[in-house]
Amino acid sequence: MVGLESHAEILWRALVYLTVVQLHLNDNVLLSRPLTESDIKPRPAGHWGTAPGVAWALVHIGLRAGATPSTKLVPMLGAGHAGVVQMGLSWLTGDLATRRAEFSRDEKGLTALARTFPDIPDIGSEVHPDLPAGDFLGGCLGGALAFACGSALDARDRVVVPIIGDGECETPTTAAAWLAAHELHAASVLPVVHLNEFRMGSRSILGRMSSDEVGRYFKGLGWDCQIVAVHSSAISIHRLFQDLLHQSIAEVLKGRRRCLVLRCAKGWSGPQIVNGVQHLGTAKLHKTPLTAARTSSIQRVQLEEWLSSYKPQSLFDVDGRPTHLLQAALDVLRLDRSAPRESAVELSSNTPRPVRQEKTFSEEVSSVLKHHANCGDFRLFSPDEMESNRLGALANLPWVSEVLAEEVLFGWLAGWISSGKRGLLVSYEAFSTLLTAGLISYLKQRRMTTTQLHSMNLLLTSYGWQNVYSHGDPSLVTTLLGFGDPVTHIHLPADPVRLGATLDRSLSSTGRLNVIIAGKHSHLTHPTTTIEAELSRGMAVWDHLSDPGDPDVTIICAGDLPAATVSAAVPLLHTEHVGNVRVLNVADLTVLGDPEVWPRGMRTDEWDTYVGSRASVLVVTLGHAAAVWGLLAGRVQQPIHVVGWREPPGPMSQAEIAAAASFDSLTISRRVVQLFQERGHTG
């Protein structure tokens, strides 16, 4: 009987061979004849240095999964640059052909793959979410460990195995995630640290450490560490790694923290010397070193020797299909995912919570979250601010996780959602900018996948209008609106009742990024007759503050503080000659955007209905005025003025901040008068 180590050896050779083929060849992908100039790409390009170690880890994890039917082992690639390995693996398993039929598992399909890489249609060259080991947000450097921990939470049937580069271990998110994992008591994670000793351009910090120092470093973080030095593809080394992997999985399933360190030379099995310069085991092998193989006979010989070293004739038959030995290994391989990869995973359906008349932020939010937690698939993540955010009563509940690291919390939440569950991250608005890179990567990934998941939900509070100087920054929303992904919704509920209803609907939604901004001090409740319209269409005219008939001036308020300020300003206009005033409450800021970009964006006819075709417009918003101008994008020809967050020059009182931004009821009433007069209405 062939052991797993023999299966690993042939699978590793096949996978690394396919990597080199994709990087360099246009034709002759089976090396059935000597390489010629026309077989080679004019400009071979792509990442090579990480490929041998990543391939090693993937085949061992997949084989161990195949030999352990009772436990799911979920590999996750942390580096987007490992996409070339993922493509080769997906071609071998047939997953790539399932997505694109031209990449069939034969010579024709492999040739098509080699010719299109790195510009594979609809897929690209980086790690892809619909292919094996692709759950993590590939472009988000450093978040794989946190993501894996979130994916493994409360999943007793699985061990998640993130493959993390030594360079990634230097990022703040990874460095914090090792320590933060102590806060999670039901997450079976076995990190594999791929220590090839170099980052992109220089030696990594871990690479400069001895193996003893590396072991003591991880032990100090609370992780038992097993280090395997891999310097060749000998059966004995495969056996050693497979045995340690098996033992480590058993330890993790017992609730112990363990990591494996795969120590190897960067780009091992590749060219040692190129153009007389040492390359093997240096940063020079980060990308392929044979960039002139088409025109240089010396490099062409090197490339042929490199490809031949993997013995392709033992891997593929004359038609390019796996040989008997390779197919036998593939039959054992099992590549588990954190959630099913159908067009839609089984998503929980939750009975909508009735709209209530709670009076405070704390009461509404707590009520909604408890309602959803009762379903068993919900979790709340917070950066140690539950008490500050008036949610202290929830702090120690089993479905709440707190740690003072927004980036780690985002990784936990993204991983949790990837396993088909629902969640929410609550944070201060000013600190949410720490999430920007992760959110952009998340949105990019979600565009590429066909898998339907629950929405990513953020609740941002403690905004700058009611905080100290250093805690005022609405830049996340401005950035997301500028990014223009149509799944993004910026919710600005006008009071606690609307906040509860918005939060409830967001937690039951799928496929969205819901960003909710609400003040924790809000007590004012506006008439509730328009709540359903605000939830369904994202806006509604507030008749209780509006004059009948076509408006001369329309005030658009977006957010709880704008709604309260506008409500106080409108009565001041009763003694002024300003014609008809209408108040439009915007509950989702994207309704102001272009309908060709934003699903809720107002069409021209809707603008005339809601705002008025001849009205001057005053927009009062919680965030930057630039965010509103970006949404309007010159599409509206009427006179418009926007009042929003204006960065104070230094520490100020809350009243001074509002006054400096013209964000008070008296100034707003005067601005309405000015707009009316500028249109030529002098009364």
Image: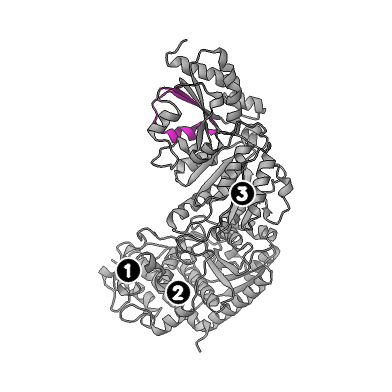
Which label belongs to residue 25? 1
Counting from the top left corner in percent of width and height, residue 158 is at 59, 69
Where residue 652 sits, quadrant-wise, is: top right
Q: Residue under circle 2?
A: 269
The secondary structure type at the circle numbered 3 is strand
Disc 3 crowd, CA 10 A, few/some/many (<14, 14-19, 20+)? many
- Report the label total: 3
Looking at the picture, tell me which residue is in the foreground, 608 or 414: 608
Foreground mark, 1 or 2? 1
Location of residue 607 with respect to 385 vertically, above or below? above
The three-letter amino acid code for the residue at tag 3 is Leu
Q: Looking at this rendering, what residue extends furthest in the bottom direction?
A: 1
Looking at the picture, tell me which residue is in the foreground, 515 or 272: 515
The secondary structure type at the circle numbered 2 is loop
Residues marked 1 and 2 touching at CB (< 8 Å)? no
Which label belongs to residue 425? 3
625 within the magenta span: yes
Q: Earlier in the sequence, mark 3 or mark 1?
A: 1
Residues marked 2 and 3 touching at CB (< 8 Å)? no
The secondary structure type at the circle numbered 1 is loop
Where residue 636 sits, quadrant-wise, is: top left
Foreground mark, 3 or 1? 3
The three-letter amino acid code for the residue at tag 1 is Leu
Residue 275 in view in this figure:
no
Q: Earlier in the sequence, mark 1 or mark 2?
A: 1
340 within the magenta span: no
Magenta-tinted stretch: 614-641
Q: Earlier in the sequence, mark 2 or mark 3?
A: 2
The three-letter amino acid code for the residue at tag 2 is Ser
Counting from the top left corner in percent of width and height, residue 115 is at 31, 65
